[in-house]
Amino acid sequence: MALTFGTDLSGKVAVVTGAGGVLCGMFAKTLAEAGAKVAVLDLNEQAAKEIADTIEKEGFTAKAYKANVLERSSLEEVHASILAELGPCDILINGAGGNNARANTDKEYFEMGDIEADVKSFFDLDQSGVEFVFNLNFLGTLLPCQIFAKDMIGREGCSILNISSMNAFTPLTKIPAYSGAKAAISNFTQWLAVHFSKVGIRVNAIAPGFFVTQQNEKLLFNEDGTPTKRTEKILSATPMGRFGDASELNGALLFFLNNEAASFITGVVLPIDGGFSAYSGV
Ligand SMILES: NC(=O)c1ccc[n+]([C@@H]2O[C@H](COP(=O)([O-])OP(=O)(O)OC[C@H]3O[C@@H](n4cnc5c(N)ncnc54)[C@H](O)[C@@H]3O)[C@@H](O)[C@H]2O)c1
């Protein structure tokens, strides 16, 4: 059982998008252990079912829903089912997100000769890849807020948690679209916090540093399991000298959702990064 740090979410309905994935699957379990009834949403229905089944087997409440955060009709349909089966949404975690190789450059720096060489430079970035990454992260956060935050209006203790990233503060090399899209999420978190401040909905975000999951595994480790050059750079730029363990995000998750502990906190983007964003490298 995960630590719930004294946060009691009994009676609350938590909707978690991207909950078939590594980080948000864990968030779904943590919220269920804290007492919430959890709607496990993912485009990958099988992954969502596996998470919901694990939660149910442990005696907590969860239900899987296939949902596409980029399609309003899909979200509306799932919203209607959640209302009927679990009740109105009190907590929304916008976890669906990620990057795509079509929006990455091969190299960190553009150098003379790159246009002629067989490398994917800035000039070769695929427009549809960039659009995909922007939409998945930004629109895929905004649309679920439109659909699920309506349930929160006029009800006490409701809040939204978005997932930003380290690269929102300072962009990481090679991934301009993902960096820009996460910066947009941080910005939107502040915007929505202000917009909803009169109706009692708190909106915050966490900005995880480096945690190994499916989506970044290939960037961080070679096929033989040895660390890539990027891993060496990340670890030397992380004062704590290691990757984070996903469970180390749980404290912030539960703190932000705890309406007694965090009652006056809205519009905040919290780095959870072993000191990465504080370190200049010197
Ligand atoms: N892993 C890290 O180090 C790290 C760091 C910073 C931020 N993040 C962010 O945390 C969040 C979760 O990341 P993760 O590492 O657990 O990734 P993950 O790939 O394990 O999970 C993402 C999930 O989102 C789902 N998804 C993708 N498109 C969808 C769509 N259109 N509709 C609904 N679901 C969709 C996927 O099926 C997947 O299950 C993402 O927003 C990611 O950008 C991760």
Image (tube, grey):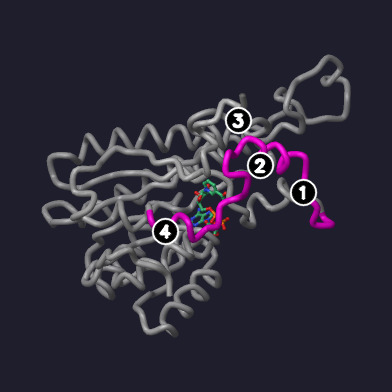
Packing grade of label 4 (10 A; few <14, some 14-19, many >=20) is: some
Q: Which circle's residue, 2 or 3, is located before the other in the chain?
A: 3
> Residue at the location (31% across, 34% down)?
190
Q: Mark 3 points at which residue?
A: 176
Identify the magenta region. Answer: 223-251
Q: Distance between the residues labelled 2 and 1?
A: 10 Å
Q: Which circle's residue, 2 or 1, is located before the other in the chain?
A: 1
Q: Distance between the residues labelled 4 and 2?
A: 22 Å
Q: Name the residue under label 2.
A: 235
> Residue at the location (48% across, 56% down)?
248
Q: How far apart are marks 2 and 3 (CA)?
A: 21 Å
Q: Quadrant of the C terminus?
A: top right
Disc 2 vs disc 1: which is toward the camera?
2
Q: In which quarter of the image is residue 223?
A: bottom right
- Compared to residue 260, the image places residue 179 above or below, namely above
Q: How far apart are marks 1 and 3 (CA)?
A: 23 Å
2 and 1 marks in contact (CB < 8 Å): yes
Q: Is residue 69 visible to the viewer in this orientation of the structure?
A: yes
Disc 4 vs disc 2: which is toward the camera?
2
* Mark 1: amino acid: Pro
- Give the structural element (helix, strand or loop) at label 4: helix
Q: Which circle's residue, 3 or 4, is located before the other in the chain?
A: 3
